[in-house]
Image (cartoon, grey):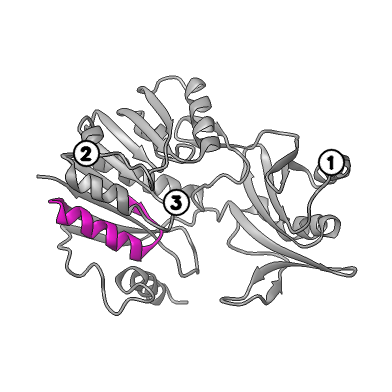
Amino acid sequence: WQEDAYRAWKDGLVTYPQGLPDDPLKHINWTTTWTGADAHGSGRRRVSVHARRKGDRVTAGFMAPRSHALHDIDRCPILVPALDRAFDISRTIAATLGDCDVALTATLGGLDAAVKAERKIVVQEHAKLAALASGLKLARLTVNNEVIVTASQPRVMMGKAEVAIPPGSFLQATEEGEATLASVVLNVIGKSKRVADLFSGCGPFTFRLAEKARVDAFDNDRAAIAALAAAVKNTPGLKPITATVRDLFREPLVANELKDYDAVVFDPPRAGAEAQAKQLAKSKVKTVIAVSCDPQTFARDAAILISGGYRARFLGTVDQFKWSSHVEIVAGFVRD
């Protein structure tokens, strides 16, 4: 790839999302746009590997696009160095467990492995699996949502907070990507004194926001909220943070609940935040920041906000998915 061609391709993922006939954002009059912030950094810190066992042979790698054909891989150049062993680790695990998917995350405590095995694991296997994890030098091994062994608590930095992440926890793909998105979010909230962080996860934005403002974090993931709340207790020097379990798809914050916030940040899963966007459109919140990994659902949610009287202040893209057909979007909306 030449850099200009690569950037044009990445920008086109937002301008002309796959499956849509034209630009879904063309009717939005953005005050400012910027594209292509390179947030690859040292590489992706998490990877999901498919591993399949047939007789004595174990294959580990990625599936071909729109296919069940598994490509055997030894090394992926876009991963952080700590994940160089990802495919060998996956083969070793599959040699014991059989067909499985292995999600590996590089953390301060070491590699966190969350395995989804096709067969059921019995208690009598735990000792053998714990020994396997020790031999592979894993910080933690989880199989089918059951923690087998924790040798060292997997931890990541989120702003000033050191967060002990739960098994299978969602993180932004790269550390640089998280930091870049957070920097934009902090710049947009300005002097806001109270902020709602919706779909907060373990707190990648929460802790950074709390350096400037009081923050209320909401997410339907109980383990993530518990991790966030635990980290709050161990992180001095921040403004007050509350952490609440709430399914924002079924029970979005309504306009009356939003009235006390100067700014709202929402970073939903790929499905977007349609129900929450509709409530924000009815609210009087002055500043809304949307973060999204899906151009189609982002366009839908942006249109809802604008129809409710928000002005589109800026649209930006952050490229933390090097060489892939994915891009992160961040946008700001203001109510004049």
Residue at left offset 43%, top offset 53%:
269
Q: Which residues are magenta?
A: 290-311
Q: Is the residue 119 above or below the residue 221 in the image?
A: below
Q: Residues within 10 Å of mark 1 (few under 14, many from 20)?
A: few
Labels 1 and 3: the sequence-earlier one: 1
Q: Is residue 318 magenta?
A: no
Numbered badge on residue 255 = 2
Relative to 219, residue 312 above or below: below
Q: Amino acid at mark 3?
A: Gly
Q: Amino acid at mark 2?
A: Ala
Which of the two residues, 107 or 252, is positioned nearer the viewer here? 252
Quarter location, residue 214: top left
User: Within the image, what quadrant is residue 261 found in?
Assistant: top left
Q: Which residue is mark 3?
A: 177
Residue 219 lies left or right of residue 60; in this view the side is left
What kind of element bears circle 2?
helix
Residue at coordinates 46% horizontally, 70% vertically from top-left? 325
Image quadrant in which you'd find residue 147: top right
Q: On the image, numbered disc 1 is attached to which residue?
A: 123
| Numbered disc 3: secondary structure | helix
Of residues 322 and 116, the one drawn nearer to the viewer in this rendering: 116
3 vs 2, front mark: 2
**In x, y percent, where is residue 112?**
67, 44
Label 1 to label 2, Cα distance in Å? 49 Å
Task: Point out the tag, 3 or 2, that comes first from the N-terminus.
Answer: 3
Q: Residues within 10 Å of mark 2 (few under 14, many from 20)?
A: some
Local crowd size for mark 3, using a 10 Å CA cut-off: few (<14), some (14–19), many (≥20): many
